[in-house]
Amino acid sequence: MSLDDKSELDLCSAKGCKAPGVWQLRWNNPKIHTPERRKIWLACDEHRDSLGSFLSSRGFLKETEAHSPNDAR
């Protein structure tokens, strides 16, 4: 496994970031997801605001929660 395989690691979802994800940005696209469905992007402290702003500007961000590496995704 390489660090490029973010699906296996709890890394920040920002492009090129290798920092641990410590925040869960829970979102959905109402045009394609049911209202209760949540997709999760992980964010480090540095990228929490920028990723959250990206999702919020599209009306996708639903919740932000602290992330623990033991959390099930």
Image: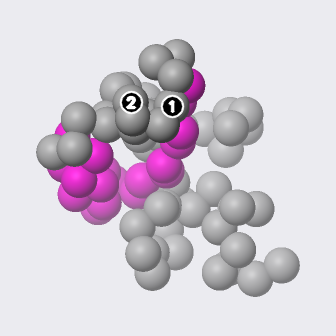
Q: Position of residue 1 (x, y in %)?
A: 83, 78
- Compared across the picture, whether 26 is left or right of 59 comes to right
Residue at screen point 23% across, 35% down: 59
| Mark 1 Cα shell of 10 Å, populated few (<14), some (14-19), many (≥20) | few
- The span shown in magenta is 37-56
Q: Where is residue 71 in the image (x, y as percent from the top left)?
A: 68, 34
Residue 33: image tag: 1
Q: Nearer the viewer, residue 58 or 31?
A: 31
Q: Residue 40 magenta-drawn?
A: yes
Residue at screen point 51% across, 31% down: 33
The answer to which quarter of the image holds residue 68 is top right
Q: What element carries label 1?
A: loop
- For this orientation, the residue located farthest to the front is 31
- Compared across the picture, whether 66 is left or right of 58 comes to right
Residue at screen point 48% across, 62% down: 13
Q: Nearer the viewer, residue 60 or 24?
A: 60
Q: Residue 39 magenta-drawn?
A: yes
Position of the C terminus, as image quadrant, is top right
Q: Measured along the vertical axis of the image, is residue 59 above or below residue 21?
A: above
Q: Is residue 64 visible?
A: no
Please name the colour scheme applied to the rendered image. one colour
Pointer 2 and pointer 1: residues touching (CB < 8 Å)?
yes
Q: Nearer the viewer, residue 36 or 22?
A: 36
Q: Mark 2 points at which residue?
A: 30
* Callout 2 amino acid: Pro
